[in-house]
Image (cartoon, rainbow, N blue to C red):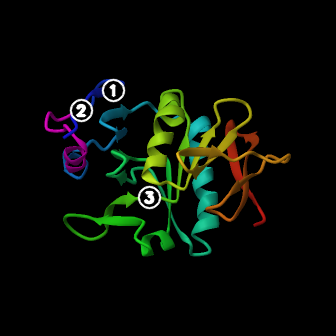
Amino acid sequence: MSTLSTIILQPDGIRIPRSVTDLESFRRWVHSDRFPEKGRIDWIGGRLEVDISPENLDRHGTLKSAIARDLGYLIERPDLGVVLVDSSRYTCLEAGLSVEPDILVVLFESIDAGRVRLVPAARGEGYVEVQGSADLVVECVSDSSRMKDLRVLPPRYHQAGVREYWIADARKATASLKILARAPGAYREVPADRSGFHRSAVLGGAVRLVRLPERSGLVRYVLERRGR
């Protein structure tokens, strides 16, 4: 049995029960009434990470909303799957992973094939967790999540069988999107073409992230798609 080796609190304030010592006890806490409603709390390979830093509207909030909105148009409108955001728990037991990604995409074909399993709630209707190999995960980089998004999560998502891992970063004047496609042993970065489009096998086309002109003090973004 693995034991808790590190607790990261950003900032301090969330109480971690002493009973949380491994992935299974962490999941029991997650699905209990005692689990905090605020912050992002992840279990990554025996490491418990808590981030309750406020979300920057321009660099994170509007970026996440725009990508989720446009992915919804590309995934949900043609009835290919679902796009999940905020507090959607994704777990892979084999990878020692239980996280709440910024955006999670699950295709119906993956559920039907058994690659993804929906975990039902203990009481009542509906589901509380996605298990298995998700089709697409998006993380929007913030100053507090930089190391986790860029270094810690890629090998774990690869081990979990996530087909594509997207890293969106709007901390600079030009927003960037990196698409990592799953290959044997590690992810392979998909290069952009001259127009800035990256090929996505999950979407069956190419996409690029564009920052729109500021309006009323707010920055907006759009995920543009091209062809098949």
**Magenta segment boundaries in residue numbering:** 15-28
Q: Nearer the viewer, mark 1 or mark 2?
A: 2
Graded by Cα atoms within 10 Å as few (under 14), some (14 to 19) or many (20 or more), the crowding at tag 3 reads many
Q: Position of residue 166 (x, y in %)?
A: 59, 47
Three-letter amino acid code at the position of disc 3: Ser
- At a point 69% along the width and 29% down the height, the residue shown is 172
Q: Which residue is mark 2?
A: 4
Three-letter amino acid code at the position of disc 2: Leu
Q: Which comes sooner in the sequence, label 2 or label 3? A: 2
Q: Which mark is residue 9?
A: 1
Query: Circle 2 sits in a helix, a strand or a loop, which is it?
Result: loop
Q: Can see residue 101?
A: no
Q: Position of residue 145 (x, y in %)?
A: 49, 32
Query: Circle 1 sits in a helix, a strand or a loop, which is it?
Result: strand
Q: CA distance from mark 3 to mark 1?
A: 28 Å
Graded by Cα atoms within 10 Å as few (under 14), some (14 to 19) or many (20 or more), the crowding at tag 1 reads some
- At a point 74% along the width and 57% down the height, the residue shown is 206
Q: Which residue is mark 3?
A: 133
Is residue 220 a member of the stretch shown in magenta? no
Three-letter amino acid code at the position of disc 1: Leu
Q: Are marks 1 and 2 in contact (CB under 8 Å)?
A: no
Q: Are marks 3 and 1 in contact (CB under 8 Å)?
A: no
As drawn, 140 above or below 88: above
Graded by Cα atoms within 10 Å as few (under 14), some (14 to 19) or many (20 or more), the crowding at tag 2 reads some
Q: Please tell me which residue lies in front, 31 or 19.
A: 19
As drawn, 69 above or below 211: below
Q: Are marks 2 and 3 in contact (CB under 8 Å)?
A: no
User: Looking at the image, which residue sits at the far top?
Assistant: 12
- At a point 35% along the width and 66% down the height, the residue shown is 118
Total number of numbered discs in the rendering? 3
